[in-house]
Amino acid sequence: MENILNFTPGPSTIYEKVPQYFSEGIQDNFITSYHRSKRFLEIYPQIEYLFSQKLSLPKDYKIAFVSSATECWEILSTFFSQYTGVYLSNGEFGAKAYQATLANKTPKKWISYHHNEEIPLIENAGEFEFIHLVHNETSNGTILPENYIQNIRKSAPDSFIAIDATSSMAGINLDFSLADIWYASVQKCFGLPAGMAIMVFSPKIIEYAQNIKSQDTHIPYNHLSNIIVKALQYQTLHTPNLSNIYLLMRVLEEIESIDKIEKKLCQRALEFRSFMLPYTDYAILGNFTQTASTTVWAVEASESKIKILSQNAFEENIWLGKGYGKWANQTFRIANFPAIKDENYTILYNFLKLKF
């Protein structure tokens, strides 16, 4: 098989040792084992421990395994359906998270802003019972600065805050204490095959979910309260993706600490922005220093240039991410994920120099 350089922002490049880990997971009989087994009850808490060691997860936070970040939209929409809430977003994935709420009885407020504008304040944020933020908007390559999230937390200390960290968890050093729910798919910065997402819960949402579970026996099966109560027992509601759970443990055992990973990705992002400066026919979306994503770079140009460049790259086994949503035809995207090797970017830059 020809060597393919995959820069798509998910599913993206997997860590080099993942095939080896998968083979060992089969030999270990975990991947084909019963998910209520003693072995599962050993691996689940081990992953939580590794989250605290490698990704700075507070020890009183818990994690759960679900199928995808898209499923998380529905889980949150159902759980907070009767709550006043606000969704803040500047891109397609934040908008879709909001759209998942529209079928519920209590409409949520949506604050939409342009990716090259100053992020608007959420006025009277403390009056909302639920606040949803997007840490890294994969569709346009922008990020929500940590100080903005800090200000939201200060202004709404009693609200439940949920954050989509799909393209940043395991790549950026997140301050998990700033929110009650974080979620991310594993096919991006975790460097794993697609098919699983991780939810992270604060002590506040855990206690609240437990109270709901104890008081209401008629909640839907896939209700967040059921997910959290099972997670406290190191169990899942459904038969989980055992392959990815095993691979996640093995990857977390091997990766560097998140501060070292973030430092490396930030350096690559700086190098990319410097590389792009001479090419005036191409522009990085969201290129403000404070809001430019470290992990996903979206580059805008004319539709004809994007089409030709993407085709030329594909012919040379370089996979560039397609544009998404309203940027579908005017952008290509490049992942800056930990599993992608530095030398792959050297090859990419040499290709772009010739084609730009």
Image (cartoon, helix red, strand yellow):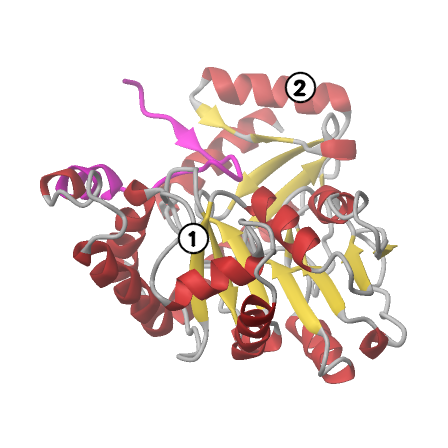
- Main SS, magenta residues: loop
Determine which quarter of the picture holds residue 26: top left
Q: Quadrant of the C terminus?
A: top right
Q: Which residue is mark 1?
A: 65
Is residue 221 inside the magenta stretch?
no
Secondary structure, mark 2, is: helix
**Residue type, label 2:** Lys
The residue shown at (44%, 19%) is: 316
At 70% from the left and 22% from the top, the residue drawn is 305
Residue 132, image x, y percentages: 71, 61
Q: Quadrant of residue 192?
A: top left
94 vs 161: above or below: above
Q: Position of residue 90 (x, y in %)?
A: 78, 51
Assign the N terminus to one quadrant of the image: top left
SS of the residue at dot 1? Answer: strand
- Say which of 220 and 282 sits in front: 220
Q: Which residues are magenta?
A: 1-24
Residue at (73, 51) in percent of width and height: 286
